[in-house]
Amino acid sequence: MHLLIRLAVAIVLFAPNLVAQQVPLRAGVARVEITPSESMPMYGYANRKCGPGTGAHDPLHAKVLVLATGDARIAIVTLDLGSFVSERVQNVAAEKLGIPVVLLASSHTHSAPQFPMGPEEPSPYREGVERKILEAIRQASEPMFAARLAVGRGSMRLGYNRLLLRDDGRARALFDNLERIPYGPVDPELMLLRVDDESGKPRALLVHYAAHAVVLGPTNCKYSADYPGVMQAKVEAEMPGVQCMFVQGGAGDINPLFQGRTGRDGDDFETTRKLGELLAAEVLRARKGIQPVGELTGPIRFKSDVLKFAERWDKAKSLDVGITTVVIGHEIAIAAVPGEPMHKLQTAWKQRADSPFPLFYGYTTTSGHPWPGYIPDLRSAAYGGYGADVTTRIEPGAGEAIVERHFLNLYGLLGMWRDTPGRP
């Protein structure tokens, strides 16, 4: 709770001066490898065909971008992990590094290690990852460089909606789609946030896209960042000196159209490479249309909340869901949502947010509260299927309530809520 109090104080300190003004931006980047050094259980598949991890096909990374305006700082940390919750990272970053908000954004690769999340369950791997993340945040925040932001959009349909309506009037999941039939709806848009230094040289490129990182199926037992790792490596090879970072969106109901299900490592990793390079090609094409934001017209502002929802199946229980809304100037608005939100919640934020560049960060924790699992939209919750009523704990309507709270926070951060009525 003391973390939430600090965040509320930070809002008071950073939010009062909402008159448009040019605000200098500083940034810093860092990265660290987090591939396990030992064999561990694998994440994500209940029916995995093999045992613990047998080694690494490609490295797993944590990548850090720290942004600052004046004394206001945030850190965006992208992780080649299935999910990650850490109250320790949030508290230590706030208390020792002066960064009160850390967005821990997992790509949700199912080829990462599985490890205990709760502090009551010791996990040397989790504790090592926490240490590495905090050190990378420290490196990224000292020293920092004068920075400018640029934004862009692209579009490529590399996913399908796995919740298919069946003859009985209910939806069920289609996990494997080897025919690559583009079942819909999906959100095919990718969004790019580039960070340049004062000379105009790009230093970081954040790629935001929504599709489950499950090209590799339940026969794979090698650690891998899946298609997001391929995309990032390809972009970094084409843009020397740039740290490419992947942020997963509302992918709770979206699977990739390319799937490696042969059980042969060579073939399945080749399929992963193809999808990752297709996404990289669209990123590299779309970067040509990136437009500079220019001087920010306001500081970095943020608001964190903990929302309480009933358990869907056991009303005597409840779930606490920690969310954070971030505004960078008046130009960029980020809705950070933990767990696995479905794509309609992302499109609702993007369509309705009063921001030139609205970003919906799914699989992103900003508190130490337990991972909430799937967060379906109302219609999906009603029709059911995997993630919509099966394996879902949160009450119907929670997804929309989360998005509405982000809108409430956004208008507050933009200075729209007044103490007295306006003009008639």
Image (cartoon, rainbow, N blue to C red):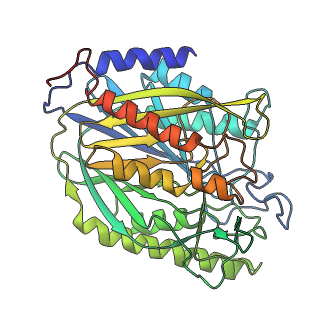
Q: In this view, does 276 lie above or below 140?
A: below
Quadrant where the C terminus lies? top left
Res. 297 visible in picture: yes
Figure quadrant of residue 59: bottom right
Residue 356: x, y in percent? 25, 49
Quadrant where the N terminus lies? top right
The residue sitting at the bottom extreme is: 179
Which of the pair 387/139 is nearer the observer?
A: 387
Residue 234: x, y in percent? 44, 69
Residue 269: x, y in percent? 64, 75
Q: Which residue is drawn at 31% across and 39% down?
A: 27
384 left or right of 53?
left
Q: In this view, does 43 lie above or below 234?
A: above
Which of the pair 76/309 is nearer the observer?
A: 309
Q: Residue at x 32, y 27 (%)?
A: 412
191 left or right of 163?
left
Figure quadrant of residue 47: bottom right
Residue 364: x, y in percent? 54, 43
Res. 238 visible in picture: no
Figure quadrant of residue 141: top left
298 left or right of 32?
left
How many marks are shown on the rendered structure? Answer: 0
Q: In this view, does 141 lie above or below 216?
A: above
Which of the pair 355/408 is nearer the observer?
A: 408
